Image (tube, rainbow, N blue to C red):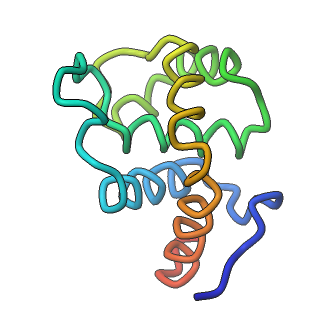
Amino acid sequence: MPTISSSRSYSKSLKATVLEAFHTGKAALPNYFHSKSRHDFTPAQLFALLVLRAQLKTDFRGVVCFLKDFPDVLRWLDLSRIPHYSTLCRTAQRIGKYFAALLDATLVQACTRGRL
């Protein structure tokens, strides 16, 4: 499978990138990390926000501010509220070793489908 470097952004469409990451996360990640977690956000939703963070080249607080300014992203990901920046940080730590592979898979799928 070809890989794409995550240091380069291949789409100028935030929506296409975020939705592709969301679908890739749904396929690759469990519904929830733990059965007794609060279930406020799915790992796929949080992964898509981490991809958004990478595309915007910002920090965790920057993503939260972006979501406050552009609430349409919440609708795209079926989010009822904005996650706290620490939630994104913990998710990044939890899926850190898988993040690059998931991001590459997202970009490869999007390019194959002609979405990017």
Q: Quadrant of residue 103?
A: bottom right
> Percent position (x, y) of residue 71?
46, 23
Side (left or right) of 39 relative to 92: left
Q: Is residue 67 left or right of residue 7?
A: left
Q: Position of residue 79 (x, y in %)?
A: 32, 27
Which of the 4 quarters of the picture holds residue 83?
A: top left
Q: Position of residue 49 (x, y in %)?
A: 52, 36
69 and 95: which is toward the camera: 95
The residue nearer to you, when weighing 109 against 15, is: 109
The residue lying at 51 percent from left, 57 percent from top is 16
> In the drawing, does residue 27 fall left or right of residue 93?
left
Q: Is residue 60 above or below residue 110?
A: above
Q: Give the residue drawn at x 58%, y 38%.
A: 50
Residue 35 in the image: above or below residue 19: above
- Locate residue 42, reporting x and y percent: 30, 35
Q: Residue at x 53, y 80 (%)?
A: 114
Q: Is residue 86 above or below residue 58?
A: above
Residue in the picture at 58% in, 34% down: 92
Q: Quadrant of the N terminus?
A: bottom right
Image quarter (top left, top right, bottom left or bottom right) of the C terminus: bottom right
Give the vertical position of 8 relative to 43 (above or below): below
Picture quarter containing residue 51? top right
Q: How many marks?
A: 0
